[in-house]
Image (tube, rainbow, N blue to C red):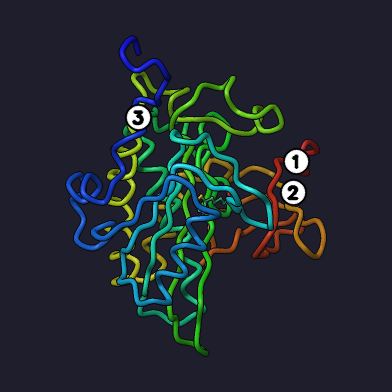
Amino acid sequence: GAAGGHRRPADAQGLSPAEVAASLSTRRMGQVSRHRVQTESTNREAERWALEGAPEGALVIAEHQTGGRGRMNRTWFDLPGRSLLLSLVLRPPVPAARAPAITFVAAVALAEAASRWVARERIEIKWPNDVLVGGRKLAGILLEMRCEGQRVEHVILGVGVNVGGGPGELPADVQHLATTLASHAEPAPRRLEVLAAFLGRFEQAYDEFLDQGFPAVQARWNEWFRLAGQWLRVQTPTGMMEGRALGLGPTGSLVLVGSDGAASEVFAGDVERSSTRRP
Ligand code: BTN
């Protein structure tokens, strides 16, 4: 602006613990928070806090990560001051095997939050938990947990949402893969609004998961899955699988029906739409 002399993103300020708490309608998510200008990874910082006793819902937000991490050891890129980078400490009272389902709860909450600014038809969840708009990635989720036997000590739910920045501002190597809310909404939402929308929906869906178990999540997730009925190829750690997609299975798998009519479940992998459609 004319007065300042240097350019500052519209919402560079606004994610302080006081501002966050004032904007929320949640009971626990984000009620205590830490805000960092820069950190290696909010997941790392939230984990340290969890080990010191952070309560459920404790939130770490950063303006920029120097070592932002994605699934499968990928790095997570951000636009400093314009990406929403957060980690939540959770202490779900469920056996360890059930806790990874929280990634699906978060994906549903992100898709629902995005629908405040983007037409629902343009939003989809790509199995397992990427949130896409117009076929490009808007948000990603990285869940990490610490267990003692079957008991969950804590879950760290890391979420990255591309909020600000136009298509031309993303690095060349992700431009065809990623998108931002600002590319689809006019005016672009502030990160604080996106945070409040996500945390509100997440808390509601998380409580539903704790009360009713996975079936409630599964149903909500399947509403955002646009590939049901299509022939897919999935690159799994143990080889390629193909089949017609049914949707999310009872434990978070992707259910495929092969050309022999037999259903099978995929538990990890990268989905692609197959170019060769089988009968
Ligand atoms: C993915 O889609 O691969 C997951 C991306 C998760 C990125 C978020 S940003 C905040 C938190 N801290 C990290 O280092 N990663 C997660």
**Above or below for 52 versus 88:** below
Q: Can residue 223 be seen at all in this image of the molecule? A: no
* Amino acid type, mark 2: Arg
Query: Is 45 on the left or on the right of 58, as rendered?
Result: right
What whole-number distance in Å separates the C-alpha atoms at marks 1 and 3? 31 Å
Image quarter (top left, top right, bottom left or bottom right) of the N terminus? top left
Query: Is 231 on the left or on the right of 128, as rendered?
Result: right
Going 46% across and 72% down the picture, which residue do you hit? 99
* Amino acid type, mark 1: Ser
Q: Secondary structure at mark 3?
A: loop
**Above or below for 179 versus 160:** above
Determine contact: label 1, label 2, CB under 8 Å.
Answer: yes
Mark 3 or mark 2, which has the lower sequence index? 3
State the residue in front, 111 or 163: 163
Q: Residue furthest bottom?
A: 149
Decide if ligand 1 comes within 8 Å of the CB at mark 2: no
What whole-number distance in Å separates the C-alpha atoms at marks 3 and 2? 31 Å
Image quarter (top left, top right, bottom left or bottom right) of the C terminus? top right
Mark 1 or mark 2, which has the lower sequence index? 2
Q: Can residue 109 be seen at all in this image of the molecule? A: yes
Residue 225 in percent (x, y) is at 51, 45
* Nearer mark to the viewer, of 3 and 2: 3
- Which residue bears the numbered disc 1? 274
* Amino acid type, mark 3: Trp
- Which residue bears the numbered disc 3? 117
- Crowding near pointer 1: few (<14 within 10 Å), some, many (20+)? some
What label sits on residue 233 in the rendered view? 2
Decide if ligand 1 comes within 8 Å of the CB at mark 1: no
What whole-number distance in Å separates the C-alpha atoms at marks 1 and 2? 5 Å
- Crowding near pointer 2: few (<14 within 10 Å), some, many (20+)? many
